[in-house]
Image: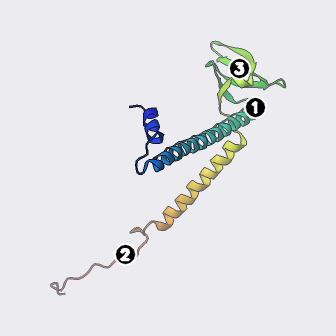
Amino acid sequence: MNVWNLLAEASGTQTNNGGGWQQYMVYILLGVILVLLVVWLLFSGRKNKQRQKEYVEQLDAIAPGNKVKTAGGICGIVVEVCDDNTVILETGSEQSGKSYIKMDKELIAQTDAKGPTQIAREQAEAARKAEKEAKNTEKKPETSEDKEPEKPEESPNTKE
C-alpha cells in the first residue's frame, strides 16, 4: 500500500470506535512534517548566506601579492586590482615565461586573502586553544621534577 491509501483509510469513512482520533493524527503528522521542512529550509538558507558573505569579504580583501585559483583552474598571483571589479593575474614562471591575464574577480574560486570574518574566527579559535592549554597545564599533576626527592625508606630488617 502506498502512503495515500494509508492516509485515505485513516481519514476516510471509518465510523468505528477511535476512527475520529486517527483523522486528527494524520493532520498532526502532516503539520509536523511541514514545520520541520520549513525549519530545515530556513537554517540551510542562513548557512548559505553566511558562506556567500564570507566569499564576498574574501574577494574584497584581495590585494596585490595574493595567490589565487580561478574557477577554470588557472593559478596565479594578483599583480593589480582594477576599479572595474577585475584583477590582473601573473601566471607562469621565469623559466617558462610569465603571462598576464585580466579577469573578473567573481571568477576567483580560492584565495589566500582573508576577510574580516575569517580573521575574527581564527583569532577566536586561537584564544580557545590558548585557554584550553592553560586549563590543561593547571590540571596536570605534579611531575617528579616538581616534587621534593623522597628519602628511601629503611626496612626494619637492616641494622646499622
The residue nearer to you, when weighing 114 against 77, is: 114
| Badge 2 amino acid | Pro
Which residue in the structure is indicated by mark 2? 149
Residue 115's place in the image compared with 81, above or below, is below
* Res 156 quadrant in image: bottom left
| Residue that extends furthest to the front in the rendered view of this protein | 15
Report x, y in % for residue 54.
69, 38
Task: Please indicate whether residue 104 sits to the left or right of residue 158 in the image.
Answer: right
Q: Earlier in the sequence, mark 2 or mark 3?
A: 3
Question: Crowding at label 2, few (<14), some or many (≥20) Cα neighbours within 10 Å?
Answer: few
Tell me, for residue 90, which label it has, or none. Answer: 3
Q: Are marks 2 and 1 in contact (CB under 8 Å)?
A: no
Which residue in the structure is indicated by mark 1? 63
Give the residue displayed 43% in from the left and 33% down from the top: 5
* Res 95 quadrant in image: top right
Q: Quadrant of the N terminus?
A: top left
For the residues labelled 2 and 1, the Cα–Cα distance comes to 60 Å
The residue nearer to you, when weighing 124 against 93, is: 124
| Badge 1 amino acid | Ala
Give the residue displayed 52% in from the left and 47% down from the top: 28
| Badge 3 amino acid | Glu
Report x, y in % for residue 139.
47, 67
